[in-house]
Amino acid sequence: MARMTFREAISQALREEMYRDERVFIMGEEVGRWGGTYAVTRGFLDEFGEKRVRDTPIAEGVIVGAAAGAAIAGLRPVAEIMTINFAFLAMDQIVNHVAKLHYMFDGQITCPVVIRTVGGGGRQLGASHSQSPDVVFAHFPGLKVVAPGTPADAKGLLKAAIREDDPVLFIEHATLYQVRGEVPDDEDYLVPIGVSDVKREGRDVTIVSYSKMLQISLEAAERLVQEGIEAEVIDLRSLRPLDTRPIIESVQRTNRVVVVEEGWRSYGVGAEIASRVMELAFDSLDAPVRRVAQAEVPLPYNRRLEQMALPQVDDVVRAVKDVLYL
Amino acid sequence: MAEVITMPKLGFDMAEGTLIEWVKGEGDEVGEDDVIAIIETDKASVEVPALRSGVLRALLVKEGQTVPVGQPIAIIGAADEEIDLEALGVTEAAPEAEAGEVEEAVAPPPEAPPAVERGRLAVSPVARRMAEELGIDLTRVRGTGPNGRIIKRDIEAYLREMEKAPEKAPPPIPTPSHAPAPEGIQVEPMTPMRETIGRRMVESKQQAPHFYITYEIDMEAAMALRQELNALLPEDERISVNDLVIKAAAIALREFPRLNASFAGDEIHIHEQVNIGIAVAREVGLVTAVIRDCDRKPLAQIAREARELVRRVREGRMRPDDMVGSTFTISNLGMFGVEEFAAIINPPQAAILAVGAVRRVPVVTEDGELAVGARMKVTISADHRVTDGAEAARFMQAFKRALEEPLRLVL
C-alpha cells in the first residue's frame, strides 16, 4: 500500500494497464504534449510515444467515434473527454453507437472503449462547465457508468474498466484529484464494476452516495457521531449496473435512508435509489427516503452562491436528523 | 457491531417468557447457533440460540426473571468493543423481579390516546410490521412522528411501558365462584401452561364452529407394510403407526389444501407448506411439536424427526423452531387404547385429526363371511368457517385411501 492522491492513483492505473496490454492507448484533447488538463497523463507521451498517446482536435464526436472504431478493430482505447459537459457533444456517439454496437450486431463485435471524463462543480467554472449529469448516461442500457469516491477505488475501477469488454463511462470528480488515500500496489488490483461498498458501518441510518458526495457523507457521519448517531455510509461506485444489495441489507437494520448526490434532485440517482428501497425494503422503512441534492438551478458562478447550491455536510446532517425524527 | 438479543416470540400468543438458565455467561465466546439460554414459556422450555458469533458481553436479565417478548435479554458483540447500552436502545435497567416473587398488582397502564381520532392510522411500514409480529394493537400506541405517525420508537416505547405494567389478560370467562377450599382438598395452583391450554381451548370451542367426521380405516395392509419395513430397520429407526398416519395425512392435505389452512378473520390463509403438528403429552401439559414439509419427506425421515422431537419435548429442551409454524395437527391417543375421540381444533388451524388405537375386531368380508380384521377409527374436527362437511369427508377418503393402499406412503 502506498499513500497517494486520487490523481496519482488514476495515473498509475493507466500506466500499469498500458504496460500490461499493448492494445491500450489513450486519446483526447491535451492528453499528450500538455500532459492532460488535470495532469493525469503528464510524462506519458515521452514514456509511450505518439502512437499510444494521441492528442486530438477539439471535436468530441470524433474522439468517441474514432475510439469506437479502434475498439471494434481490436484495440482498447481510453478516450478522454475533458469534462462531462462536453460529452453532450458526443452524445450520439456514446449512447447511439458505443452503448449499442454489441447488441445491435448480435454480439459479433464488442466495443471495449473507456471514456474518462471529469464531472462536478465547486470550482467557479460557471453553469455550463460545472454539471453532474451522471444519471443522464446511466439511463442508457449498454453503457457502464462508474464514479469512484476514493483513490483506491479510482485505481481498481479504472483498471477493471480497461479490462472490461463493454464500454465504460468513467467519471472523475474535479475536486477529488487532491484527495489522498491508501492505494494497493498490486498490478492486478481490480475493483469489480457494479459492486457497492459499505465505507462506514452504523446502525441508525443508511447514507447512500458516491463520488465527491461520498467524502461529504463520510464527513457528515463523523459529525453525527458526536451526537450519538451512527450512520452507515454506502458508496455506490457504479451507477450502472447498480448494486442495491448492500443498501437493502443496511436499510433492514437501520430503517432509514438518506441519498446524497451532487446532481439535481428531479429524476436523479436519489430518485432511483428511493424507488428501489420502496420496492425491496418497504416493510423496513420507518421514515420516507430523504434526498440531498443540488439546488435545482443552473450552478451559479459566484462562489458563495455556488456553495449554497451544492450539497454540503450540514445538509446531510440535517437530512439524517429528519429521517430520525430528531 | 454489538447486537441486542431479545426475548423471542415462540408462538402467536406468547406475551412473555421466563429465563430459567443462562447456558453461557458474560464474557463467553459463542458461535452462531450455540445455545446461550433456556427460556420457559407457558408451553415448554426452549433453547435460545445465538444468531451470530461473538462474545456475550452483557446479560440483562437474571435467571428466573420473566420478561415480555421483545425485551432485550443480552448483548452480543466483539470482545474489545465498547458497549453503549443506551445507543443500543437498552434504556431501562432490567427489572429486579426475582424468581418466584409474586408480582405486586400494578395499576393498569394508562390508556394511550389513539394516534388519530378518526380515519386511517398513520404508521411507518416498519412500525406496522413490528406491531403485527408482536401482536400490538396499533390504536393503543401513541404516534410521535409527523402528523402523529406511529414510528419504530413509539412501538419500542409502548413495549417498555407494557413491561413496567404488564398488560392484564382479558377478564376470564365467569365461572361459578368457589368457596375457599374446604378441608380434605389438596389445592394446586394453575400452572402457566395449564392456563394457556385452558384459554386457547376455550377460545377454540367458543369461536370455531366445530364439526366432526369419523371414519373407520382398514389397517391390515398398513400394519403388514409396517412390519415388513421394520424388519429392515434397526431398533431405533422403527416406524410407528403414528408415522404412517402423519404421512397419510400429508398426502391427503396436498390434495385438499383448504384443510391445510388457517382462519384469519376475514380471510382464509392456505399454507403452501404441509407442516404437521403432533400433540405430545408432558406431565405439565400438552405441547404441539412440528414436523415440516411432511408431504415431501420420506417416511423414514418423518419417523426419525418425530422420534427426535418427542425426545426433546419430553426432556423439556425444545427449540423455537420445534413449536411454531404447524399448519395441521394430529392427536393420537391410540397408545392408551382409546378407541375413538374428537379433538379440539388448535387455533387458528382449520382442522385436527384425532386418532384412536388399531384394534383387532370382527369384520364382514366382501364375501359376506365373518373374519378378524385390524381397524382404526379416526375423527376429524374441522372449522366450519373454513371448510364444509363434504370437503372434509373427501379429505378423509383420501386419508383412508393412503392408509389402505399403504404403498402410497413409501412412494
Image: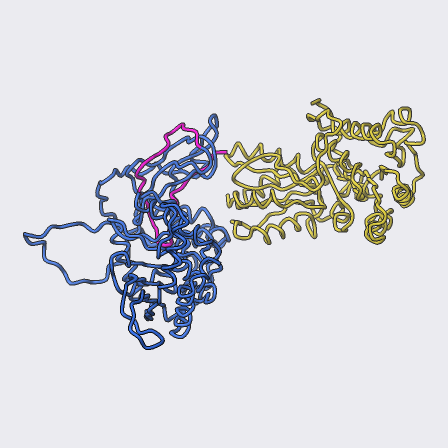
Q: Is residue A65 left or right of residue A293?
A: right
Rendered residue at 47%/34% (across/down): B53
Q: How many marks?
A: 0
- The answer to whether residue B228 is above or below residue B81 is below
Q: Quadrant of residue B33?
A: top left
Rendered residue at 25%/39% (across/down): B99
Q: Is residue B409 left or right of residue A104?
A: left
- The answer to whether residue A315 is above or below residue B367 is above
Of B144 and A238, nearer the camera is A238
Of B38 and A199, nearer the camera is B38
Task: Name chain A's colour.
Answer: yellow
Q: How is the image coloured?
A: by chain
State which region is magenta: B1-30
| Residue A36 inside the magenta-drawn segment | no
Asked whether residue A176 appears in the rendered view, the answer is no
Question: Could you say where residue B162 lies in the image, as x and y percent from the top left?
Answer: 34, 48
Task: Name chain B's colour.
Answer: blue
Of A156 and B29, nearer the camera is B29
Question: Could you say where residue B264 lies in the image, as x and y percent from the top left?
Answer: 41, 63
Of A312 and B133, nearer the camera is B133
Question: Could you say where residue A223 lies in the image, as x and y percent from the top left?
Answer: 57, 33
| Residue B20 inside the magenta-drawn segment | yes
